[in-house]
Amino acid sequence: MQAGKVAILILITALAALLSGCGGSGGRTVAVVDDYKITSEEFENFYPVAYYAFGSAQDEFDKKQERLDSLIVIRLLIQAAYELGIDRSQELAQVVLANKDKFVIDMLYQKEVVDKASVSDAEVSDFWDHLEYKIRASHILVSDYDTAQAILERLTSGESFEKLAYEYSIDPSAKRNKGDLGYFTWGALVDEVQKVAFKMEPGELSPPVQSNLGYHLIKLVDKLPNEQRREFRSMKVDLRQQIIQRKQYVCQREFFDEISEKYPVTIDTTTCTYLLHKRSQMYPPMLLETLPRNDFDLEQLDRNERELILGSWEGGQMTVLEYLTEIQILPSNMRPDLDSYDSLAMVISAIKRTDVLVTEAHRRGLDSDPQVIRKLRLFKEYTMADMMRSDSIPEPPPPDDGVIRMYYDKHPDEFTNPATYHVYEILLADELKALDLKKKIKSEAKFREMALELSERPGKRALEGDLGYITRIKYPEIYDLARKTPVGTIGGPVVTRGKYSIFWVVDMIESELKDYLGVKRDIFRKLTRQNEQQAFAAWIEQHSQETTTEIYEDALWGTINMDKYPDEEQSGS
């Protein structure tokens, strides 16, 4: 079973997927290990294909088959872990407990975001219809309607859109692009804005358009056919995923707003006043005026002061110590002053959002949800497999000095610094011109002069074409030919980067065998790793022979979305 050697390398991926994926226990059975059924849902949770691109359905099937082998190996480890009683260990219990709330939050996210972001075939088709054109637009974003209306009146009276965008837009990019959004297609902007923009004609100016960001004034600059739009069948899978992501973003934003309203943060103004007063007593007035009002030096607070409550909400609270520690990750311009109570409440709400979500999830009883329990069980078992692999499979003895020396003596190529060549180069797009120059140039000085004038390699013309001492990794074509070119002569032309290179060999440093003592530690590590892999492979082989395993290829094919491969038919079923 080839996947055995890499099984543990993807255990971390499997655990991470459990913490962020959807999970499930239904679906078809893709494999059976003794009496344990690996379902398509467990497999897809273990191996989320959204992170991979495949050239064909067969490529995807082959890769999934490899990963299924890895999951089977993990099942072997889990069986052995149960036999050794690892499932009853205190260490395992602590790991599971420390991660339980992550699964509960994941289920809350599933219900409030993922489940509410379903996409119909009609929506995908409508999205594709909107891709007929690409447009170029500019916008001015402001925070309120009155400001937007006042700017609109100035625009209609003839003032410069770019000038007003630069002066008034709260879009952070406006100072750089003066409101220009460039060319884009449907799906690039928030819905409220793109619905208006794509109905406009070049030169047209919109009334104020409200979105969650504020109020937009839109000017359509250009409208062209979208050359990137392909036929619907080849795009529908990607479009569906794009729509899902947009919907999930909206659902998440709305849900977080709802949570913020449900669990408002109350600022303890007495604590804020105390901190500001203490701050004013710590520094002279002249120095105090130069210090930012949104921070405080923790070293100036005693233990009791650090434990003062700065903010609280139903189910939790934040101390001064927690707040001043957490805000260190925020840019200074995002840290509110200690007397800006509304802003302070917003920052604390954002920092403590995870705690609030845990409270909400537990109040809904999601810690008892069957899917959470299943995912937690899988997490426990995958952790058991990791512990089994790390701590319970006997390790082979380390390689001794004789074995290490023997490896060094038998693999000199592995420990030899290859020869390097110092070359000057002239890179040209014209092969005939390169051949002509090679015939005419008779000296290094003339070569460097012509390189300064003609070479087309970026950044090297000013250096007279000097590539320094080259290795095969960076300049493989030149290096291979330089090995056959005597020092002090010209070589080429050779095709590199789609052009033609001639070069002058200035010097050569011979290959050199590395000192044994200098590489002994690296050899030790390599042989140790190889021995561990071989021991693990032997362990897998032994336990595979003691276990009944069956793979259902038709069910594995069923995990592949054939819509991604419109020109192919399913194989192997």
Image (cartoon, helix red, strand yellow):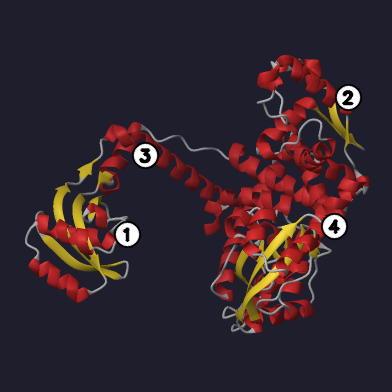
Q: Residue 410, percent across and down?
A: 27, 45
Quadrant housing the C terminus: bottom right
Q: Residue 152, percent across and down?
A: 75, 65
Query: Which mark sits nearer the N-terminus, 1 or 3?
Result: 1
Query: Which mark sits nearer the N-terminus, 2 or 4?
Result: 4
Task: Measure how far apart labels 3 and 4 are at the Cα level.
Answer: 53 Å
Query: Of helix, strand and loop, which one carries label 3?
Result: helix
Label 4 belongs to which residue?
112
Query: Which mark sits nearer the N-terminus, 1 or 4?
Result: 4
Cβ–Cβ under 8 Å for marks 3 and 2: no
Label 3 belongs to which residue?
523
In front: label 3 or label 2:
2
Residue shown at 68%/77% (left/top)?
Answer: 236
Q: Amino acid at mark 1?
A: Pro
| Residue 65 drawn above or below residue 371 | below
Q: Amino acid at mark 4?
A: Glu
* Disc on res. 458: 1
